[in-house]
Image (cartoon, helix red, strand yellow):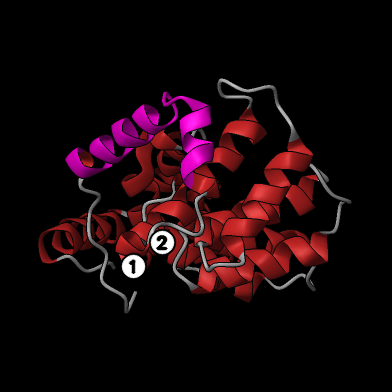
């Protein structure tokens, strides 16, 4: 693996989850008021941070509507707010719009449009979009089936600690590369965060000869200590 792997910072991930939990506990009317304020007073209009906050709140308000958080669930209205944020370049909103198109929530089901939105978001570095674009290529959903492309996008998401992508990257290591050492790395990395990984790793270890297993363990330890994958 040429791209460095850096272990997840559990403290920062927990802080991010706690922050988002707190955001979704906000008064939805306050969130909407911020989201609607696209023409702020002159004092704030030139500040990039203010504009980013408005866009972020447009996405958050869409999530509240989509998931029924402190508001009645309304897919069509959520779709409208996701569109407003996505049109301004918010990658989370692009991914959310892709999910709407994939599931037919608030709009007609259109897997080709979903994959297009996943790609736009993925190219901006959004890990969930990278994972779902990999799923599209794996299933031939909206794009021609292509396991090489699926593996590419799953790898990008795996490097950003998406458990499903990490497990799938291990699967692709065996299926496309016949590389049990790389599969060992990713299945051990994801561990219990994916329900199939522990048993898959156990079965893989049973099939590995002692020398290959020692090499896999050596590379796993080296990868974590040097911030590089196998």
User: Is the N terminus in the top left, top right, bottom left or bottom right quadrant?
Assistant: bottom left
Label 1, residues with CA under 10 Å away: few <14, some 14-19, many ≥20: few
Q: Position of residue 74 (x, y in %)?
A: 74, 32
Image quarter of residue 211: bottom left
Whether 204 is drawn above or below 41: the answer is above
Kindly tell me whether residue 171 is visible in this rendering.
no
Which secondary structure, mark 2?
Answer: helix
Which residue appears at 74% of the width and 61% of the height? Answer: 114
Q: How many marks?
A: 2
Which secondary structure, mark 1?
Answer: helix
* Relative side of 157 to 146, left or right: left
Residue found at the far bottom of this picture: 2
Image quarter of residue 76: top right
Marks 1 and 2 close (CB-CB < 8 Å): yes
Q: Position of residue 46 (x, y in %)?
A: 34, 70
Whether 30 is drawn above or below 184: the answer is above
User: Is the C terminus in the top left, top right, bottom left or bottom right quadrant?
Assistant: bottom left
Residue stretch in magenta: 11-34
Image quarter of residue 116: bottom right
Kindly identify which residue carries mark 1.
48
Considering depth in this image, is 131 or 197 the residue closer to the camera?
A: 131
Which residue appears at 12% of the width and 66% of the height? Answer: 226
Within the magenta stretch, is there residue 229? no
Q: Position of residue 217 (x, y in %)?
A: 22, 54
Predominant SS along the magenta part? helix
User: Which of the numbered marks, if any, corresponds to residue 123?
Assistant: none
User: Which of the numbered marks, if any, corresponds to residue 51?
Assistant: 2
Which residue appears at 66% of the width and 35% of the height? Answer: 66
């Amino acid at each position: 693996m040429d791209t460095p792997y850096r272990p997840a910072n559990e403290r920062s991930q927990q802080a991010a989850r706690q922050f988002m939990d707190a955001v979704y506990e906000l008064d939805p009317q306050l969130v909407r008021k911020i989201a609607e304020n696209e023409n702020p007073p002159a004092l704030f209009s030139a500040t990039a941070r203010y504009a980013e906050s408005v866009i972020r709140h447009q996405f958050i308000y869409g999530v509240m509507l989509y998931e029924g958080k402190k508001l009645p669930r309304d897919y069509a209205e959520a779709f409208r707010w996701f569109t407003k944020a996505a049109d301004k370049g918010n990658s989370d909103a692009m991914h959310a719009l892709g999910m709407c198109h994939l599931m037919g929530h608030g709009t007609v089901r259109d897997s080709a449009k979903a994959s297009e939105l996943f790609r736009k978001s993925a190219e901006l570095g959004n890990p969930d979009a990278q994972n779902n674009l990999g799923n599209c290529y794996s299933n031939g959903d909206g794009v021609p089936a292509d396991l090489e492309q699926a593996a590419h996008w799953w790898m990008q998401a795996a490097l950003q600690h998406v458990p499903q992508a990490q497990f799938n990257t291990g699967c692709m290591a065996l299926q496309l590369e016949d590389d049990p050492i790389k599969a060992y790395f990713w299945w051990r990395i994801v561990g219990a965060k994916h329900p199939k990984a522990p048993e898959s790793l156990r079965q893989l270890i049973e099939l590995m000869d002692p020398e290959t297993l020692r090499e896999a363990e050596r590379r796993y330890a080296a990868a974590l200590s040097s911030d590089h994958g196998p």
